[in-house]
Image (spheres, rainbow, N blue to C red):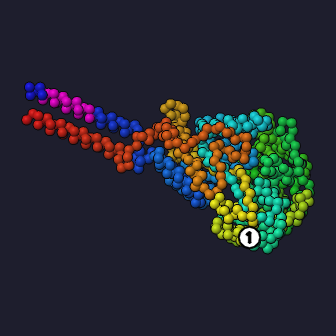
Amino acid sequence: MNSKLNLTIRKKSIILVSLIFTIILFSAIATAKIQAASQDDYFFRVRILSRSDYETEHLANLIAQELQRIRIDSLIYPYPGGVFEAAVLSKEFDIVLIDFDWPGYDVNPTYVFSEGGSANYWGLDNEIAFQDFSEQKMLEGIVETNITLREGIYHDWQENIMANVLPVIPLFNKITTYVSHDNLLGWDHEEGIIYSLPYMEWSGLHTGQNNTNEFVDYIDPNDWDILNPLFIEDEFFVSLIAEPLIRINKNRLPEGVLAESWAFNSNQTILTLNLREDVTWQPDIDQLYLDEPFDADDVLFSIKMYQEVSSVGTFFKWIDQIEKVDNSTVQINIDGNSTQPGLQPYVPALSDLTKLMLPEHYLNVDVVDGIPDTSHENWRDYGENCLGTGMYFLKSYSEGVESTFNSNLDWWGSIPLGDLDIAKYIVRFRDDLNVKMLEFETGKLDIFKDYRTYMTDFDGVTFQKQTRDEYDVTYFGYNLQSDYCLALIDQTLTEDETMTKGLAVRKAIAHMIDKNIMLDLLDIEVEIIETPLSNKFGTFVKSDVTVYTASHDLAKYYMYKAGFDPSSLLNPGFTPLQVFASIIMLSVITVSIIRKRSKKKQS
């Protein structure tokens, strides 16, 4: 009887021990296969790059906190202006929060989302799944002259870029409200200050104002730059001096500036520009060049410099050939798609001709292989002072204090538009928001450009507020060439082969972004957007594009598709090794208890 009992007990012990070891083996295998979190309890880490201003840092911190919920760790790098821009260009990030001024008045997205785009900060190339389709649509869009068909092409492009590529998560479209004193007439914020100036005048003196022929503006001293349009992105103050061939008005229609008129041939592959004949360049600072006429040579020279010298982008790739017909006529052969035989139209051509013109007579010096010596003293003086054909010239610059622009008495526009009532444009250097607000309220500044919705002091009758939509958009962008966070760019297909694992990770992150919460953190006025395009582009914006709503469940779903199972993560402080050791210890204790019970029964 005892022998049978002992045999039964031994069998049970063997079965139990076998079961325990099976559990141990299964646990070891599961620990090896599941990409569970490390001791720090995250799957991988991303570097978040942002500007070091108060609002953007808050947004970066919010994103980092949200990503922790799907076990993505973050390193946040808040940098000031110049350092931030350098980090963006060198792609020292995995995720970047960037306020981006759309590079042109046309919907053309090739600058930003094409492999060769000058503002392709995301590292897009044709090796990325579905980017070839995106490139195809962008090419179709720039050559399609039928507006209805063009809208459809860009709708297809937006859906593909958002659903299948996802280099950015569009966040906001910027709205600006500027405030001025109520005695300012002729100012149209939608047209902008530059093109309002010929019509602006003071109806009297406002509080703190002493002179009605002056306009006092301001800028952060760190944002004041050289005055050479080839090397700066913000052309506002340079535009007081220099002018383009064409401008785009508030209705997004072209208007002639230095080009008096223009005409296309029947298939829009040849553009003829007729230049104004009554335009002269301002004198240089040394008064060596006087009464130099603006002509076709300046146009050819300017376009060549934007093509080959500019440091802020690649421009005019669509120009197949440019020819001087005579001093006041330029002919441009257009090829919007060089992969196709013959000339192809390029619809954004007029929008691209909004670049500021350069003085060929002054800058075309010490030429080698067709390129002037940009280290020449003329180039240095031009960068410090500029010279143009426009309304004003730089009269003085006092570092850290102010710059003064005086009206150009020989400006060609004085004839059709009348004399400039604003004879002096003063720019004061101010960086403290409270100082700027106080100086505006006391009348020392004539414009206030840092308006926030909480500033109710400007709701009174002594001020006028004007609001406009901007081309500026805020993106949450990914670095698709990252060598730090490989999970973000993994081109391996998911198990169900519906997308790459990198895209699944990007979609997971997108679903952790709550734009409404982010909106509450902003003092500036913005609109939430769902496509990469600014709302300024109207019907070109696809209204039913794929949208990434804030959803923890969807974020976890896409993390799982990418091979990261958030439910597999252990509680903080318990690593897989600790759990494995705990199972072994439990097994040993269980076996020990069984043996003790067996001995008791035998006795």
Position in image of residue 468 (x %, y %)? 73, 53
Query: Where is residue 176, by image quadrant?
Result: bottom right
Residue at horizontal 83%, vertical 44%? 332
Q: Amino acid at mark 1?
A: Gly
Residue at horizontal 14%, vertical 35%? 598
Q: Secondary structure at mark 1?
A: loop
Q: Judge by depth and name the residue closer to the eye, 161 or 217.
A: 217
Position in image of residue 255 (x %, y %)? 84, 50
Q: Which residues are magenta?
A: 6-20
Q: In what quadrant of the picture does the C terminus appear?
A: top left
Residue at horizontal 75%, vertical 48%? 105
**Mark 1 highlights which residue?**
443
Q: Is residue 54 in the magenta section?
A: no
Left-right relation of 359 to 440: right
* Magenta stretch: dominant secondary structure: helix
Q: Is residue 15 in the magenta section?
A: yes
Q: In what quadrant of the picture does the N terminus appear?
A: top left
Query: Where is residue 426, by image quadrant?
Result: bottom right
